[in-house]
Image (spheres, rainbow, N blue to C red):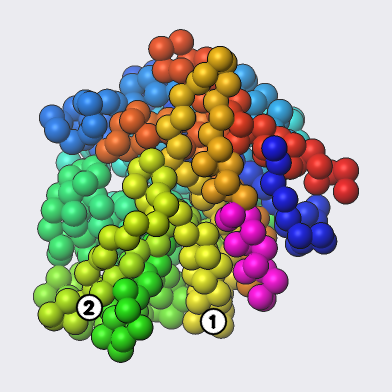
Amino acid sequence: MTFELPHNSPLTKPGFIYGVATAAFQIEGANTADGRCESIWDRFCATPDKVHNGDDGAIACDHYHRLEQDLDLIQSLGMDAYRFSVAWPRIEPAPDQWNEAGFEFYERLIDGLIARGIKPYLTLYHWDLPQYLEDKGGWINRETAYRFVRYAEKITERFGNKVVSYCTFNEPLCTAFVGYRWGIHAPGYADHKLGYQAAHHVLLAHGLALPYMRKNAPEAEHGIVLNFTPAYPHEDTAADLEAVEYSDDADGFWFLHPLMTAEYPSRVVQQDAVFMPVILPGDMEIIARPIDFLGINYYSRRVVKANAQGLPEQVHNEHPKTDIGWEIYPDGLTHLTQKITRCYARLPPLLITENGAADNTEPENGEINDTMRVNYYQQHLLAVHNAIESGVDIRGYFAWSLMDNFEWAYGYSMRFGIVYVDYQNQQRTLKRSGQSWQQFLQHRTTR
């Protein structure tokens, strides 16, 4: 079983990048090794009733100790690139204390990728803030933005142009809104004003860091990764269509619009005026500094209708869903990238930096036939093809995820990997979806 694309699809050309993605806290384990300090996710996992089954990231996939094996695994898939994140707590375990053992781990990772012909795509922040910064307010505290700049400067000084692509933040919506506004993720606050303030400081940190990153790695690309769950109207009425626009502006476009225009979306600013963040003069211009790429993370859509106040209310439908309960809707990826392209004249090239499905198929006779995930990838690759054919500039696609891992508040109950991980013995087994990627990429090189 392999993926099929139309003849001469742009996705079959050598210049189109294919990769797999992971995040440090989700796979590394070794949370007390080599001087790493406590992160907000260590603290959150230790808080009762926050993570499914009381799971934590102490061991996860033990990637820290199995690095060479996992790099060989990526190479065996035939991937062009690997998107990974650096654990800030491993690099700066105390304020202004830079941990050489942490740098050396990521140096081995990056050099190991290069030796195997795999392009390193580095994410600076994938949610694991050092707890000592959270103790001083975390992303609610403007000072954290400046601490991030110093961290970004140190990483890019060390690795420079060896890294092909640097991402400042993965999914600031989850950091700020899921973590500070809704309380589902670390650090677990549930306060609208705190969420908006955290969001502003994350975007400010992104903009502040860019000049230092460019100075230290002038040949690399520098950008950010945003997640979107685009809205669709329950009915084709003016009220529902307006609810769709509000839903999008309050979701991923809350972060994209200021990056492109130096302004937050006016619909949401007016509606949530009482919760708006403190913004200092010059902040918005810093946030809107040019980027070389925009990463798009897409998994699903939402269907909304206007409530009595004209605001979006999610409507549940009976369409097929993945095991995490997210609707399978590949056209949403096409339409989302078309809308983004339509809205912003200064949009940089796009990368699909995460896309995948929770498919909890268990091994049977030594095989994992995750056909739902195989079909999900097939449909979404076609959605990317359709977007490019319509004029959207998409340069690459990263499957989420390389292997089953710690799925945040879901713990180990959800499996997104194309490689099965037996958490008892850490054995890796290539799933049917991984085999499909392998065959697809082998076929691409022989066209």
Residue pointed to by mark 2: 306
The residue located at (54%, 48%) in the rendering is 376
Q: Position of residue 22 (x, y in %)?
A: 50, 38
Q: Amino acid at mark 2?
A: Ala
The residue located at (17%, 76%) in the rendering is 307
The residue located at (42%, 52%) in the rendering is 320
Q: Nearer the viewer, residue 163 or 182?
A: 182
Q: Position of residue 186 (x, y in %)?
A: 24, 42
Q: Earlier in the sequence, mark 2 or mark 1?
A: 2
Judge the density around disc 1: few (<14), some (14-19), many (≥20) Cα neighbours within 10 Å.
few
Q: Give the magenta range.
A: 379-391
Q: Position of residue 206 (x, y in %)?
A: 42, 60
The residue located at (46%, 24%) in the rendering is 362
Q: CA distance from mark 2 to mark 1?
A: 25 Å
Q: Is residue 357 above or below residue 390?
A: above
- The answer to if 133 sits in the magenta stretch is no
Q: Is residue 280 above or below residue 2?
A: below
Residue pointed to by mark 1: 342
Q: Residue furthest top?
A: 425
Dominant secondary structure (helix, strand or loop) of the stretch shown in magenta: helix
Q: Is residue 327 above or below residue 292?
A: above
Q: Nearer the viewer, residue 106 or 177?
A: 177
